[in-house]
Image (tube, coloured by chain):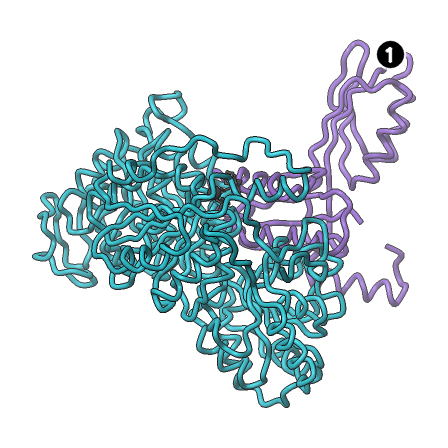
Amino acid sequence: MTPVLSVLVHNKPGVLNRITALFMRKGFNIQSLTVCITESPDVSRMTLVMNEMDEAALEQVMKQLHKQIDVLKVTDLTEAPMVSRELALIQVNSPIAQRATITSLIDPFRASIVDVGRDTVTVQVTGDAEKIEALISLLRPYGIRELARTGLTALPREASAVSELRRLNESQVLPI
Amino acid sequence: MPGMSKPADEMKRPMGEANHRTDGAMLLKGADMVVEALRRERVDVIFGYPGGAVLPLYDALFECGIRHVLTRHEQGAIHAAEGYARVTGRPGVVIATSGPGATNLVTGLADAMMDSIPIVAITGQVAKTVIGTDAFQETSIIGISTPITKHNYQIRHASEIPKVFKEAFHIANSGRKGPVLIDIPKDVAGETALFSYDDPPQLPGYQPTVVPHQLQIRKLMSGLSRAKKPVILAGAGILHAGASAELVAFAERHRLPVVHTLLGLGGFPASHPLFLGMGGMHGSAAANKALHETDFLINLGARFDDRLTGKLEFFAPHATVAHVDIDPAEIGKNVSTQIPVVGDVREALLMMLAADVESPHADAWMNELLATKEQFPYWYVQEGTGIKPQRLIAEIARLTAGNAVVITDVGQHQMWTAQFFPFEVPDRWVTSGGLGTMGFGLPAAIGAYFGKPEQQVVAILGDAGFQMTQQELAVIGEMELPIKVVIVNNGALGMVRQWQELFHGERYSASLLEWQPDFIKLAEAYRIPATRVQEDDALTDALAAFLAASGPGFLECVVEPRENVFPMVAPGTGIHQMVGVKP
Ligand SMILES: Cc1ncc(C[n+]2csc(CCOP(=O)(O)OP(=O)(O)O)c2C)c(N)n1
Ligand SMILES: [Mg+2]
């Protein structure tokens, strides 16, 4: 299980340092970390993707986060219904002759070409980690020059939406 | 002036700039705001050391009515603040300048963090205008202290001072207590802002659970009533929560054996028939037997430190574990716990006392433990003409009728004190547990004296650890503090020497102090009356005279150099595998 935690923190200087210092001190490993402002300017949301760990270890991470005075809320999204997205920019070799292949390749991913050079194109893709991994491995044979990923950001699904989804699932009206 | 803790005429220094307003707020300079905040927090003593960045603050402190104790090193100041906090339960306050002054606090902050000691540390910082330029004596004490404080603040404008101080004192002394640092740039001290101290702290991210969940208490009590081999492990949480009376009542109500951690000593009376002694590496055979064999362990405010548990697989392997702790992160951290109870341990005990359940049927177990306690007391062999350190401690206990506030440093003498000084009442035992900080003892004794000036204060120090902060003798000499300093001189970094003897083939690498200063002359240089004793038959008289004298005193006790601390749970073994349980 790769835990995903959503952490609401005070938006003020030094808070990111407190969190990373905590992780270093306790030896917790992070796969990705995103920090951004929320609807309230005093509050930031951190989305943490942790390395695989057992439940006891995850509980300890959450409790330690909670101990921080500037942490307002810690939510474990790992198994909760959530929307999660990541954005990747992939600069891939693409001589003019091959460009059409690349375009058709990325099309099903709803990715787009956001920059074009003489020998390369830069592809932008958003989605969950799995989708991004899939596109990267498809593009790898062409030669990836540079890759930038934002890391995951996530929100729990709204409760009403969740129950609606469940209802639809159960009634099997709509395959989601 | 509504809300003032002291009438204005009591302040010796008139607040020149004070401009009183009808709403209780007043216009003050930053430095005066700090002093005013300290007054509102009813701080009666500050330990500190001045320097460039705190000059404006020291100017405001001058003749302000709050006592300032000038230690001779900032480490001394923060350990003194810890000693004060430990015996009073109130936050200790320490001030240091920027750069080296601030970095000298690091050991004390880490020590206070480990042992949950409430401290408010105030550091000066270079002016805001030059922060980040590597200015003279600039250091990022916020960066340095983040992992070793409960929280820290850098003040960006004088207007933040009241809010920050209010929060800092609240955070330091509530929930799981700990150190909070406030870094104040020099120019902030000169800024003027409105001071109002009436608003309660607003800390949405800090809401410690004080009252435990009734359901968890019920689970605990019903588990207890079915237990055959129950035991209470009582930690320093009992002392922080002021729960000694409730602990005694609860243990007596259900006839439960009680084991203390090193830091918990004094929470339960040592002479109580239900007391098994300290558990852990140098604990009693009975205490460790109980922790190993129990089927129902109630941890009250202890954190299952590895020096207590020994190898985890042998720690209470057959037990249902209930753990009461104000810090939820401690529950389940080291020992898996079936009944977690988050809350203040005194509140928990009150709820546990109110529960109407049958006491466990554990007479056989209790009798077995008491027989073990009887059979394997702490021991030493009195032989030769030299002084056995254990007898020294027992004699100090006897001659002070167990009433003294006892402070130790770290090492063998610390463990012997924990074993041979029977602590009967709470808050008279000051030692560095989690961090094991050599050099802690002497300054902590100074702080303990200021916290409990009416009590006799005895500092029991190792010959090596004493030398780490010995300059604080100056405070004792200068202020003629009636602190009795005992040096347990075994000519060695005794605890290190013991491990080398037992685990490194007697290769005494850098652990023997073959050269030592003349301790008597050293104490006398600080104008403290000093005596040396080295023969066992002279010990009692020397001690009695030393303890009875008024004013400061220094006793160098030359003890058997090869004495070891037993019993012992060797590192990496289980608590049931103690060695040296008898001569
Ligand atoms: C600051 C610090 N450095 C090193 C140690 C490791 N250490 C633990 S006990 C000890 C020896 C202490 O010697 P002494 O103060 O004479 O006490 P004794 O054990 O001899 O009673 C040492 C070096 C420590 N605990 N703290
Ligand atoms: Mg020694």
The chain containing the residue under callout 1 comes to A
Q: Write the residue at 75% across / 56% down.
A: A55
Q: Is residue B158 above or below residue A124?
A: below
- Indicate the position of residue B152 as horizontal and vertical percent values: 43, 44
Q: Which residue is mark 1?
A: A96
Q: Write the residue at 45% across / 63% down.
A: B421
Q: Colour of chain B?
A: cyan
Q: B367 or B34: nearer the eye?
A: B367
Question: On the rendered structure, is B224 left or right of B52?
Answer: right
Asked where in the image residue B62 lies, by quadrant, the reply is top left
Mark 1: secondary structure: helix
Q: Give the chain letter for purple.
A: A
Whether disc 1's CB lies below 8 Å from ligand 1 is answered: no
- Indicate the position of residue B335 as horizontal and vertical percent values: 69, 60
Residue that sits furthest to the top in the current view? A118
Q: Quadrant of the N terminus of chain B?
A: bottom left
Q: Which amino acid, mark 1?
A: Ile
Question: On the rendered structure, is B267 left or right of B221?
Answer: left
Q: Write the residue at 31% across / 37% down.
A: B471
